[in-house]
Amino acid sequence: MDEVLNSQKTALDTRHQKMLIDGKWVDSASGETFEVCSPANLSTIATVPRGRDEDVRSAVSAAERAFPGWSRTAPRQRGRILQQIADKLELHVEEIAKILASESGNALRTQARPEALMVVDVFRYFGGLGSELKGETIPLGENILSYTRREPIGVVGAIIPWNAPTILAALKIAPALCAGNTMVLKTAEDAPLAVLKLAEICSGFLPDGVLNVLTGYGTEAGSALSADPRIRKMSFTGSTATGKVIMREAANRIVPVSLELGGKSPSIVFPDVNEDWAVEGISNAMRFTRQSQSCTAGSRLFLHEDIFDSFLEKLEANVSQLVIGDPLDETSDIGAIINEKQYNKVCGFIEDGLNNTDAKLVFGGMPPTEGLLSEGYFTMPTVFAKKDNKWRLSAEEIFGPVLVAIPWKDEDEVIRMANDSHYGLAAYVWSHDIGRALRTAHAVEAGWVQVNQGLGQAMGHSYGGTKQSGIGREFSLQGMLDSFTQTKNVTVNLMTNRDY
Ligand code: ADP
């Protein structure tokens, strides 16, 4: 594995950032701050306000005040504003990408720049959907007019994680605002800076209070937001454990929730596949170039026993081409793990794999302890082979580049193993026989199955999980309607008193 780390430490100067409440850039009420660090070299990039209850209350009040005006703005006008934001964002893609790479550790070329570009796409897509907030008419007879309206819900609370912060923020902001809601969004403590830049661009076009963006810790600002009685809808992306906390809080007030949570997604490879071609897709599906810090990572690789050894050899040859290094270096394919806690967690899983006598290390292993890569939270793509699906490494979401390969010979057996998980987010099926591939796609318990590809989400498809991977869909018109509107029925008797 090549090592590339250059002297360019970060794209940013160390500086103090503020958060956005009611159209103004403010410090936390307490004046407290915390540091945001580069996972590639552990230097401090910036300090941000440590928002708490009082800041959440101010932000929710601002969003509440802004709601009547924004919800009554014509939907196409709201959409036009989102499109203007998209145009402005497009001019700042490079800046946002560099901030993202610095704070998240995601490599600029393979991850951060494509993420920033997609944020533009998200705003443009939802900006075009203002006219689609349509209701229906119900045919109850000539003298009755019964119709539905898609109305905004109110103040939406949004909480996002650090792994793709600007995309995940955009996927909440754009559809919620298009539908006429206002929002208070809490950024992730490890990667708030690019989202603050996104907020700055949005605030140049939006009325004060329509979008408020807070920085702070989950157990402080996050829990205060999810508990605020004026929040009428919670939209959360993060771990399944925190998703359960958010859902319990919402249950107290019967508030709807959208949850996009974890995954342990299977890749099922049939023996008729073109191996040389499929290894590339398997590596993509595992999201090795984003350190596998992705909920959709295809982290359980079910290989038919006839191709088990040959496929893993080819996979090793393919993955060993990837360059690990400074996220800001254009030649790096793979960057760094977000923080020390995640890094130690990933190392713990690798250690477990190495200590398991039934498992075989195919390639990778513990991270380097010397050299430039030891200066940050860099890990190596690692693959273990084990005969069965029954161990911690194939049950728990690692959120790091540790893939487990499991052999199979019978179609029913592999589907049973693939579905033996409390997660159900994504799945990948690889076969030349399209009938068999689609049969398998239909049998797998997942919200999103890809056949013969391992790509990321695209605008327009309804993305989300089944089982403990979540509730609700994002990326689509359907997702916007289901998550950010409520239906009101109006039934009118067209016979007036005079008609009798
Ligand atoms: P991760 O382990 O990937 O950071 P989390 O689910 O802990 O995933 O974090 C995702 C987001 O949820 C972050 O913005 C975090 O601050 C927030 N969060 C964590 N705990 C809570 C909580 N108890 N209530 C509300 N938000 C929380």
Image: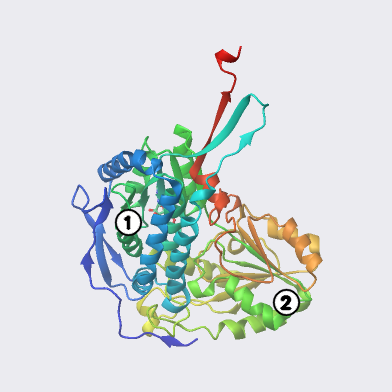
306 w.r.t. 263: above or below: below
Q: Secondary structure at mark 2?
A: helix
Q: Residues within 10 Å of mark 2 (few under 14, many from 20)?
A: some
Residue flagged by tag 2: what amino acid is it? Answer: Phe
Residue flagged by tag 1: what amino acid is it? Answer: Phe
Give the image location of residue 451, x and y in percent.
69, 67
Q: Is residue 467 left or right of residue 192?
A: right
The answer, for residue 161, to whether it is visible in the render is no
Residue at 54% across, 46% down: 481
Q: Earlier in the sequence, mark 2 or mark 1?
A: 1
Spot the residue most to the front. 498
381 w.r.t. 138: above or below: below
Give the image location of residue 311, x and y in percent.
69, 80
Spot the residue most to the left. 31
Residue at 55% across, 75% down: 382
Give the residue number, with chain letter if any, for mark 1.
205
Give the residue number, with chain letter if any, for mark 2.
308
Give the image location of residue 150, x and y in percent.
52, 40
Q: Is residue 362 left or right of residue 342?
A: right
